[in-house]
Each structure stands twice: as C-alpha cells, then as structure tokens.
Image: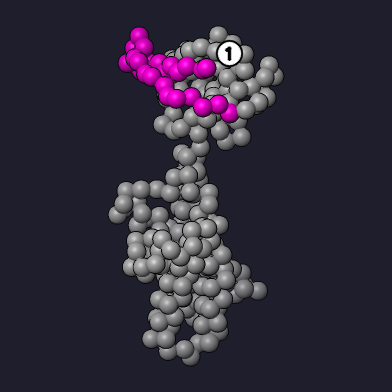
Amino acid sequence: MKQKLFFVLVAITSYFAGVLAYLSYLSIVYDQGLGSESSKFIGWTLPPFLFLILPFYTLMYRWRKTAILLRAALLIGLSVVAAVSVPLLMGLGIGPFRSLFSPEIGLFTLLFASSALVFTLGSVIAAKGRGYILFTLAALIIIILPIHTLSSETEKSRPIIHKIPQSFHGTVVIHYGESDYPPIPKIKGYEVIRISESGSYRTSSPRPPRGIRHVLVDEKGNEIQPISIPGETFKLGITPDIKISEYEVP
C-alpha cells in the first residue's frame, strides 16, 4: 500500500516537474509567462503525460531489465511524440510546428523529458526502498511552485470589469490611488469597478496593469451586454500617487 501511494506521488510530481521546467525555461530564456493561456496549459499537456509518458514509463519500471540505452532512447522518443501531440490538442494541427527543432516543440519536449526523468528517479527510489522522505519533501516544492506560478499568471490575465449603468452616456472619470477610498473589490476572482450614475469612481487601488472589459448593467447591477470603448486617457491628480483615467461612453 505504501509503495502504491508513493507511486501516485511520483506520477504527480513527475508531471509538475515538467511544468516547472517549462515555466522556468520560458521565464529565464524568453522572459515571458503563459499569460492568458495559463488556464488552458494543463488541458494541453496533461493528456499526453497521462496517455503516453506515464504508461510507458510504468512499463519500464516494471520491466527492470531494460537496458539503459533503450530507456534513454524511449525517453527522448516519447518526449518528442508527446510534444508533437500538444499542437493537436491546442487545435492548431501540426502545420505550424512541422520542424522538430522549432522552439515550441523544443519547450514541450523539455516538459515531457523532465517529467520522464523525475519519474525514473522516483522509480529507482521505490525499487531501492530508500529516500522516500527526501523525495517527498522535494515533491512538495516541485508541485507547489508551478501551481503558484500558473495561478498568478491566470490572475494577471483576468481583465478588470467596469460595470456602467445602461442609462449613462458621457465621460467616465476614475481616480486611482486616493487613500481615503476603499480598494477595488474582487467578485468571483475579478476586480470589479462599479461606475456611478454620475460616471465617477474613486479608489485607493492603483490602476491595475491589465485589460478592461466594459459592460452595461441595469439598476440592480445585472450585466446586460458588453460594450466596446475605444480607449482611455490618463492624467495626474493633485498628488503623484493619484492617477485619473477618463473614457467616453457613447
């Protein structure tokens, strides 16, 4: 029973080790994050791991007499196959990623190869019966870090919702950074700004560095329909901390 539970931990850790390797490379080499794609990333990469990497490496673990060179060849081959399958799950087909040496395929190959390596390490520990505690401690870090990063990326990509009364037409004026007013509230994970009937709003929060989704609402605050606003202008308030945003509602 203990070994089966450890095997489950190894499988989970292996996947997140690959995710961590992917995110780390993306950040260090390209200075980028996943942005709005964070919420879809798991759906793109988990199926190849579950249906390609995990079954084959479970067999390799059972078949302990497998030569090291064969294991290495399978590691590389399966990682490439799993990486090539990701564009299909993304709905892009294989066209944009025809080259096996493209940066995208390389990143996904890194993900699955890292997963396979950690799974192999966990399998060796399980076979020898030593190192459970150390692996478990490392697993906690490996699992928590990418989950935290993906959650942060998802949070950053969420737009700010501006709820505008449907009867309002004119200039909306928002004062950011006014300490005497409350911060922007969060509703179901989204920061929501409720524009008053006069078209003004004041908050102690700074201007969030994200996009805005403008929606018209009725008297009860229920959303009626989204609207398109061409843009907003900024100017400084009476102190450097206060920034004023303005835009026109047709």
Q: Is residue 85 above or below residue 190?
A: below
- Is residue 71 found left or right of 40 in the rendered image? left
Question: In this figure, which residue is indicated by the disc labeled 1?
Answer: 168
| Nearer to us in this view, 172 or 66 | 172
- Mark 1 surroundings: few (<14), some (14-19) or many (≥20) residues within 10 A: some
In the rendered image, residue 246 lying in the magenta stretch gets the answer: yes
Q: Nearer the viewer, residue 112 or 182?
A: 112
Left or right: 41, with 97 as reference point? right
**Where residue 44 sits in the image (x, y, percent)?**
52, 59
Residue 242 visible at all: yes
Q: Is residue 227 magenta?
A: yes
Residue 119, x across and y down, in percent: 48, 72
Residue 190 picture location, percent across and down: 56, 33
Pick the residue in front: 133 or 200: 200
Q: Residue at x 30, y 54 (%)?
A: 29
Q: How is the image coloured?
A: one colour
Judged from the image, the secondary structure of the residue bearing numbered disc 1 is loop
Outermost residue on the right side: it is 220
Q: Which residues are magenta?
A: 226-250
- At horizontal 40% and vertical 63% (from top left) the residue drawn is 97
Number of numbered discs overlaid on the protein picture: 1
Residue in the foreground of this view, choosing between 201 and 128 = 201
Q: Which residue corresponds to the image point at 49% horizontal and 49% vertical from the top-left? A: 38
Q: Residue furthest left?
A: 29
- In the rendered structure, which amino acid carries the disc numbered 1? Phe
Image spot of residue 40 (x, y percent) = 53, 52
Whether residue 31 is situated above or below residue 16 in the rendered picture: above
Residue drawn at 46 percent across, 75 percent down: 78
Asked whether residue 125 is in view, the answer is no
Pick the quarter of the image with the N terminus: bottom right
